[in-house]
Image (cartoon, rainbow, N blue to C red):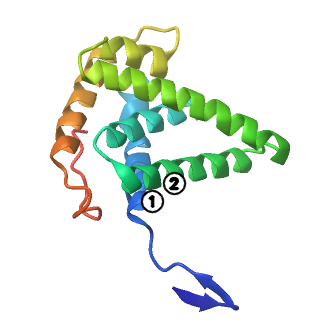
Amino acid sequence: MRSVNGFWKRDYRSKGEILCLMALNQARNPYFYENLDVPDTLEGRFDCAVLHMCLFLRHLKGSLAQAIFDSFFAYTELTLREIGVGDLSVGRQVKKCAQFFYGALQSYDEGLDDKASLQEALRRNLYGSTCPLKVKELTDYVRKCDQILRKYDFEKNPLTPIIWPI
């Protein structure tokens, strides 16, 4: 910590914030929007970010899982404010985002555990009513990410970059 004009500022980011930014950076990869036909809209980008956060949270427990979750919703709230959502509406919008998040987390977990169709969950959450031809490729990508993250040691190596399949 350092003092700036009498206020204490953090000089570092928490492990949760670092992991959250890894997920968000991957979700911003143009490949999803240009090659996999994920809608390049605010909603499509949020949905892609939720997918990557869900992949992380499958393999995190305890305080680190809570920290990455808190960081994600802090960024979500900041984004809502930046796009002009008023102070009185931000809480309501964050609640809607959280409801979508929890539903997506459950459907992706069930799909990755082969209890339900992962491909259907991705189609529903990322593509809405359309049925793009690229959903099979996205499903393969998600399964590869899940395998990569299963082997990653989050506690010891939060600064080690994750080698994503795309």
Query: Which element carries disc 2, helix, strand or loop?
Result: helix
78 lies left or right of 52:
right
What is the quadrant of residue 148 in the picture? Answer: top left
Q: Residue at x 36, y 24 (%)?
A: 108
Please give the residue where the numbered disc 1 appears in the rendered image: 17
Q: Residues within 10 Å of mark 1 (few under 14, many from 20)?
A: many
Depicted 121 relative to depicted 66: above or below? above
Depicted 95 relative to depicted 115: above or below? below
Q: Nearer the viewer, residue 77 or 69?
A: 69
Where residue 15 appears, as percent x and y from the top left, is: 38, 63
Q: Nearer the viewer, residue 13 or 137?
A: 13
Please give the residue where the numbered disc 2 appears in the rendered image: 71
Q: Where's the C terminus, which quadrant? A: top left
For the image, the number of numbered tags is 2
Where residue 140 appears, as percent x and y from the top left, is: 22, 24
Where residue 150 appears, as percent x and y from the top left, is: 19, 42
Q: Residue at x 26, y 23 (%)?
A: 112
Q: Residues within 10 Å of mark 2 (few under 14, many from 20)?
A: some
Where residue 158 appears, as percent x and y from the top left, is: 29, 61
Q: Residue at x 31, y 12 (%)?
A: 116
Question: In the rendered structure, which disc, 2 or 1, sits on the residue that comes first in sequence?
Answer: 1
Q: Residue at x 24, y 22 (%)?
A: 113
The tag on residue 132 is none
What is the quadrant of residue 91 in the picture? Answer: top right
- Give me the C-alpha separation between circle 2 and circle 1: 5 Å
Amino acid type shown at disc 2: Ser
